Image: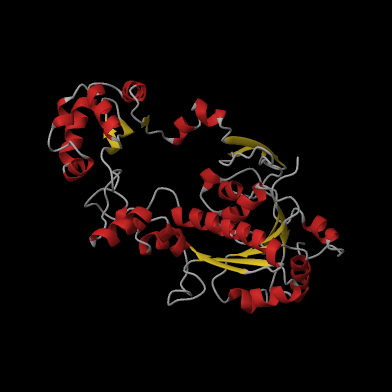
């Protein structure tokens, strides 16, 4: 079955997470993503300790971000390999790179140079802080971006030490935003016949996720602070302790709030002046949590989730990843896929969060061995083998 991006070729000059996550999204949609790796390969091939080692030369972090791609090794400091790269770019629709600003120009593979040989090329740059501005030349890492974008200032418990988000939100959001830009540029090219330059960064992408926090700051003039699992605009909406652990619940409407009080057998809370309205509950959140956890301590998380859902109150358990992948819903939604790797054998990979009726996504290729497709790609370019030897 034809995939949504069938026929689109993408040259991938990215490493580690943000860029590879971007190009994997596009590969999953059907694009032919050719991963151009330096001698020694993407740094993520050797990231992590022994617990992340896979059979063969690669570690699990590389497997997580590079399915559905082909690999060729080119040393862009060598004239011959640069010639191969230019030939590859002539056949491409998109180039994605994640070097620090200025590196591609030194290598001779910058936007201006590449569009001279392919005017329809869409060229996307992913960096720590963008191509312009006073921080443009700073190194970019997810941790640094989370700190400088404000994300860490609102993560963790109130009054606690700075805590980064548990998942690398800057790396992953920049990948999604860049992929969105590439898709938009492909549509625009159908109308104009021209490619274009895309510039995004970890800093901007992390800041773009802070929609509630910036709204609060601009509306109130107050600097948002960490609130644990609580919501900035609604209460109750957070994690609560039960008799055997924790659960989450959300009562955003007056109907849900009344149903929650009834289910907890605490109907008097609904008419308590401290909790009658959302604004009152927000102002008295500490007292609200105390009252609710006193009631929730009578039963287990599983019992409360069942009761609250039956009453129309959104609720759920807090799962670790062992529980996530034991959950029937995870498998019903096909969020675990398997693929045959030439060295590691059958390996698991996350499924696709996007379901498409006419062009469904699928795992077509295992994460490539270093340079695995070099000969194949060079043959497509009408060239002899080289560059990945």
Which x, y percent locates residue 4? 69, 47
Which x, y percent locates residue 42? 62, 58
Kindly identify the residue that appears in the image at 62 percent across and 51 percent down: 24
Quadrant placement of the N terminus: top right
Height in image: 111 above or below 213? Answer: below
Near-viewer residue (90 or 194): 194
Near-viewer residue (59 or 171): 171
Quadrant placement of the C terminus: bottom right
Kindly identify the residue that appears in the image at 32 percent across and 56 percent down: 213
Q: In the displayed image of the protein, which residue is found farthest to the left?
A: 273
Residue 262's quadrant in the figure?
top left
Colouring method of the image: secondary structure
Residue 170's quadrant in the figure?
bottom left
- Specify whether 319 is left or right of 47: left
Which x, y percent locates residue 313? 33, 28
Q: Is residue 160 visible?
A: yes
Q: Is residue 17 visible?
A: no
Height in image: 298 above or below 188? Answer: above
Which x, y percent locates residue 193? 72, 67
């Amino acid at each position: 079955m034809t995939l949504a991006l069938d026929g689109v070729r993408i040259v991938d000059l990215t490493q580690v997470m943000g860029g590879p996550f971007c190009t994997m999204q596009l590969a999953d949609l059907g694009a032919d993503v050719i991963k151009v790796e330096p001698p020694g390969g993407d740094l993520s091939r050797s990231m992590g300790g022994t617990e992340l080692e896979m059979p063969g030369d690669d570690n699990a972090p590389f497997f997580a971000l590079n399915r559905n791609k082909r690999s060729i090794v080119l040393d862009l400091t060598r004239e011959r390999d640069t010639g191969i790269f230019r030939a590859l770019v002539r056949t491409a629709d998109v180039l994605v790179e994640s070097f620090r600003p200025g590196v591609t120009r030194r290598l001779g593979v910058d936007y201006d140079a590449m569009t001279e040989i392919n005017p329809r090329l869409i060229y996307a740059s992913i960096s720590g802080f963008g191509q312009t501005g006073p921080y443009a030349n700073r190194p970019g890492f997810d941790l640094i971006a989370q700190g400088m974008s404000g994300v860490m200032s609102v993560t963790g418990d109130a009054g606690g030490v700075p805590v980064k988000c548990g998942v690398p939100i800057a790396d992953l959001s920049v990948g999604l935003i860049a992929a969105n830009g590439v898709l938009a540029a492909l549509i625009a090219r159908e109308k104009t016949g021209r490619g274009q330059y895309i510039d995004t960064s970890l800093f901007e992408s992390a800041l773009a996720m802070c929609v509630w926090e910036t709204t609060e700051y601009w509306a109130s003039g107050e600097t948002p602070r960490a609130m644990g699992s609580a919501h900035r605009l609604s209460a109750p909406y957070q994690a609560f302790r039960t008799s055997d652990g924790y659960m989450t619940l959300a009562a955003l409407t007056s109907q849900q709030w009344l149903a929650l009080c009834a289910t907890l057998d605490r109907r008097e809370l609904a008419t308590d002046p401290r909790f009658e309205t959302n604004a009152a509950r927000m102002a008295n959140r500490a007292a609200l949590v105390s009252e609710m956890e006193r009631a929730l301590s009578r039963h287990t998380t599983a019992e409360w989730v069942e009761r609250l859902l039956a009453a129309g109150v959104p609720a759920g358990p807090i799962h670790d990843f062992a529980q996530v992948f034991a959950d029937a819903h995870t498998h019903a939604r096909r969020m675990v896929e398997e693929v045959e790797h030439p060295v590691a054998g059958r390996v698991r990979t996350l499924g696709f969060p996007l379901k498409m009726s006419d062009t469904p996504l699928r795992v077509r290729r295992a994460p490539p061995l270093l340079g695995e497709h070099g000969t194949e790609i060079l043959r497509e370019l009408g060239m002899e083998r080289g560059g990945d030897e």
